[in-house]
Image (cartoon, rainbow, N blue to C red):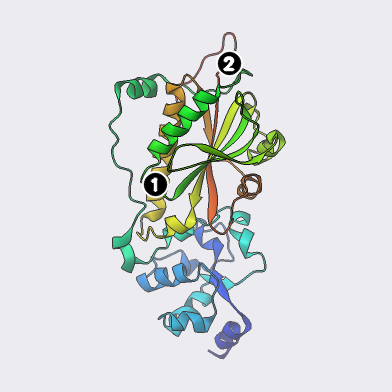
Amino acid sequence: MAARNQRCARFEKMITSSLLFFSPGTHPSLNGQSLGRHLTLEEIELLSFYMTAHTLSAGVAAGFREKTIRSALDAKLLVEEENTVGTRWEKHNWQRAAFLMFAPARHREHATARPPTAYQMTQDELCATIERRTTRFFSNQPITAETFLRFGVAAQFHLRGKPWFSIYAVVQQVETLPKGIYRLDPGTGAFHCQRQGDAHSELLEVVHGQWWLSGSGFCLFLVLNLDAARTSTSPDGYVDTFLALGQAGQALVRSACLLQLGAWMTPAISESKCAALLGLDVQRQEALYFIKVGVPEQPHGARRSPI
């Protein structure tokens, strides 16, 4: 008991361990008991509270039993706050998704990021969904400004009722529009320029050098607004959010196909480099998905694969 008290006293603040979200056996340093059993409701709420660093006294003041806090520390569910808290989730390849996973059960009735509802597609949309193909080769033919604006209106329509998502576009080649970073206005569907300039080299770093982003058109980023997503206090908030992300991505690709454009998607992006490129507030925003949109260039003899 004395040793445990000394440990808590030594840590100015404690935070939920990012290693908690790895599979059992991946990190022997994590006490097996934390992954070998189901967590209690009190432990889940405790881990949710300590997703932001707090002291022991703050946890007690929030209504948690001191015994529970010390037990979580012994099991390495809680660890000492590091000096690099802002990057530790990316460092351990989990980012801040746990904010959605560990949501207090007592607030479930206020969930906002609900599972996606069924969407009644038009005949044109259904045909586009059936016929669309992945595109890895994009031509240098620029997209018209009108097409870009029409895409923005379609994107705004599909994101209605999803305040936890924002859309950013990096314009590579669109007629009459300067290259740069744009953000979609969720109210009007218009893209507003945030910063001008060619960002090709930065884009390459964001997608780890994947060559298919070359060509004309633009690149989209679906960004999670953490403040809005955290109000999704359902235990299924993590799953619900990514179901909604998949639905939004599907709708954006379909919108591109309806405009006779091609698209290629990936979640394999560097969150830190993406945040720097788009100017995101890393405490409140997290880029989750990347979509390249442009005019397809079909190489001679190549076959396209169904999505």
Which x, y percent locates residue 272?
A: 64, 50
Which x, y percent locates residue 123?
A: 30, 21
Which x, y percent locates residue 37?
A: 40, 66
Tell me which corner region of the image, top left, top right, bottom left or bottom right, holds residue 8.
bottom right
Residue in view at x 40 percent, y 63 percent: 103
Type of amino acid at the residue the image marks with label 2: Glu
Residue in view at x 58 percent, y 63 percent: 28
Tell me which corner region of the image, top left, top right, bottom left or bottom right, holds residue 88.
bottom right
Q: Identify the mark at residue 297; answer none if there is no mark.
A: 2
Residue in view at x 32 percent, y 68 percent: 106
Residue closest to the eye, 187 or 136: 187
Q: CA distance from mark 1 to mark 2?
A: 33 Å
Type of amino acid at the residue the image marks with label 1: Lys
Q: Which quarter of the rendering shows the C terminus?
A: top left
> In the picture provided, is 225 more to the left or to the right than 198?
left
**Mark 1 vs 2, N-terminal side:** 1
Label 2 residue SS:
loop
Which x, y percent locates residue 10?
A: 63, 83
> In the picture provided, is 268 more to the left or to the right than 62?
right
Q: Identify the mark at residue 162; answer none if there is no mark.
A: 1
Residue 306 makes an appearance in the image: no
Tell me which corner region of the image, top left, top right, bottom left or bottom right, holds residue 95.
bottom right
User: Between tags 1 and 2, which lies in front?
Assistant: 1
